[in-house]
Image (cartoon, rainbow, N blue to C red):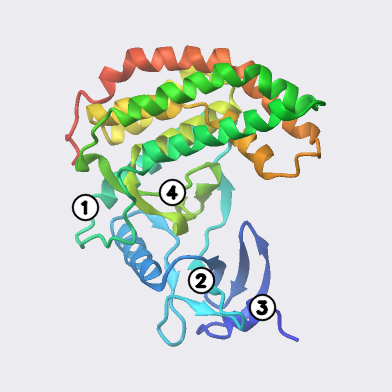
Amino acid sequence: MYSRPEQLLEQYPLIVKSFSKGRECYLCDTSLGTVALHEYYGSKERAAFLAKMLRYLREKGLLVECIIESSEGEILVTDEEERKYLLTESYHGAECDVNKEEDMLAATQLLADFHRISRQFPEEIPEIIRRNHNSLPDLYEKHNRELRQVRNFVRSRKRKNAFEELFIRQYETFSRKADTVTKALQSMSLTEEIYGFCHGDYNQHSIIFARQGIALVGLERFTYDLQIRDLANFVRKMMEKNNWDIELGMKLITAYVKKRPLQEEESRCLYFFLSYPEKFWKLANHYGNGHKSWLYERNVEKLEKVILQEKERELFLEELQKSLFSFHFQENQLY
């Protein structure tokens, strides 16, 4: 009996030698080399546009995983349950090491190259790719409502577990910070110029140090949005891994800015994105959506870490605020 990957790969002009489970995909050794089979949740139109964008980035010198068409020339194939899949090239190599400064700096530089080059894409951008420009304040307000819902539930419990006790003691402090950022973003009027193509989920797994060079991978979730969100998300994740080391954080942002200087409103957005207590909200939201009667010791440890790191995070934000003016002094130089 054929497995699902084998059945799907029969629709491609290649010979399958072996396959294994990878990160959110199947890695397949084939006559075309190593390829990756991904389940795809978007539309056919979105996938077709992604294929165009990847080819464009490749032509401009970026190492990306281009999409391989089926024997019928299709971008997507489906299984017997009508689930959609796409096949991409795959790169062998090490991911970005969150303990190596040189790896993280290379990752921010690669992100800047992607943002800068993709801005020159010559074709019209379809609406299915664009995000609603009003979605950001709405998203943060939704996060704030979710925090309040968790607070109300925890308050209602007579016997609280360790996570709930810790959360309720810290709620007011983090909630005030979340509200402050949300109000600041609601007061901003963002121009079209600071929107562009985004990776959508840029992290240490999105960069591969391959034999061919440094590869940008995992673009299936790409969108057209505030590009500075990609940088903010990556910096936040690296800082959480490194106890919000001020010197490291400033180096990461500077490495990006040297390749793509920021406009003034992008610098402000970067500060606000990093000011929002994202990790506190994520842990609360995970708790709110999970089985509340279960107490996972790991979640308590994660919340304790967030609380312990908050002083270092605030010190980093103070330094970032002082340095904001320097991040846009060469604005438009590379556009």
Q: Is residue 311 left or right of residue 113?
A: right
- CA distance separating discs 3 and 2: 14 Å
Q: Nearer the viewer, mark 4 or mark 2?
A: 4
Tell me the residue that label 4 is attached to.
200
Q: Which of the two labelled residues, at mark 3 and mark 1, occupies the earlier sequence position?
A: 3
Q: Quadrant of the N terminus?
A: bottom right
Q: Nearer the viewer, residue 94 or 243?
A: 243
Vertical side of 78 occupied by 268: above or below: above
Q: Which of the two labelled residues, at mark 2 and mark 1, occupies the earlier sequence position?
A: 2
- List x then y, in percent, for residue 124: 21, 62
Q: Amino acid at mark 1?
A: Gln
**Mark 1 Cα-neighbour bin, 10 Å: few <14, some 14–19, many ≥20:** few
The numbered disc on residue 262 is none
- CA distance separating discs 3 and 4: 28 Å
- List x then y, in percent, for residue 208: 52, 49
Tell me the residue that label 1 is attached to.
120
Label 3: element kind = helix
Tell me the residue that label 2 is attached to.
87
Label 2: element kind = strand
- CA distance separating discs 3 and 1: 39 Å
Q: Nearer the viewer, mark 4 or mark 1?
A: 4
Mark 1 and mark 4 in contact (Cβ < 8 Å)?
no
Mark 1 and mark 3 in contact (Cβ < 8 Å)?
no
Identify which residue is drawn at 34% across, 24% down.
Answer: 184
